[in-house]
Image (cartoon, helix red, strand yellow):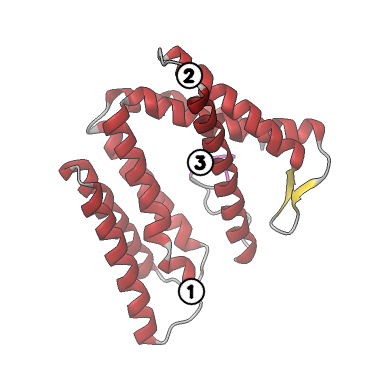
Amino acid sequence: MLRTRLISGVILAPLFLLLVRMGWPYFDLLVTAIVIAMALEFTRMDGKAGDKRRILMAVACVIAVAVVSVLESVTLSLTVVLVATVAVIAADQLAGRKGFAIVQATVAYVAIPAVALLFVARVGGHDTVYWLLAAVWGTDIGAYAVGRMVGGPKLAPSISPNKTWSGAVGGLLIGTACALGVFDWAGGAMDFRIILMSAFASVLTQLGDLFESGLKRRYQVKDSGGLIPGHGGV
């Protein structure tokens, strides 16, 4: 499992970084493809969703991303997200459907981070995206490695039995260090604010991971998808 995960990372990470550097439209197309995969994986966890509803959610996510990519309007893009989410909730209420919360939340959960990422790329450039990726990837790798080596008390056993406090602290320290390293490499002026922002990005990464682990546990699935070998989903 670990070997497969490492091989996937070594192959895909350089390609991802290259497309970030190439910018529009290549990076935007990559984000769009990821959004489609995420939307389909996310709704797949709810076996009641149905193929038509899953495809509809993916299309709504793509429209939201396309708006910010082509029209460069974050406000309009978020409006698309809001309208699509409200429309799905209203349709479910009218049809008397219950237990579709995961489907109803798909557009917001998938599209908003994608829109934010494209906005960061537009405003801050590819170096800012590299900084963010360093925080996320460093946190993920650090938490996994330190957690396995050190072990200790569980972080949230009812949500994710394998996560430990040592892994959380290790992920925070390594993720923050990686982000600061990339920031320094890019020629940024180091100060206390960037340290806090890097640490905050690391904490958000771990909270997001816990949130998805909670969803997997609720819907009793081990992985949200198998598109990337060795990883539990896109």
Residue 48 versus residue 137 in the image, above or below: below
Q: Which residue is mark 1?
A: 48
Side of 66 where 37 appears, left or right: right
Q: Which residue is mark 3?
A: 228
In the image, which is nearer the foreground, mark 2 or mark 3?
2
In the image, which is nearer the foreground, mark 1 or mark 2?
2
Image location (x, y in percent) of residue 116 = 35, 43
Side of 76 where 33 appears, left or right: right
User: In terms of sequence position, does the residue under pointer 3 or pointer 1 come before the other?
Assistant: 1
Q: SS of the residue at dot 3?
A: loop
Image location (x, y in percent) of residue 17 = 40, 25
Q: Which residue is mark 2?
A: 182
- The alpha-carbon separation of the residues under discs 1 and 2 comes to 43 Å
- The alpha-carbon separation of the residues under discs 2 and 3 comes to 25 Å
Mark 1 belongs to which amino acid?
A: Lys
- The alpha-carbon separation of the residues under discs 3 and 1 comes to 24 Å
User: Residues in magenta?
Assistant: 227-232
Image location (x, y in percent) of residue 20 = 34, 27
Image location (x, y in percent) of residue 43 = 45, 62
**Residue 5 in sight here:** no
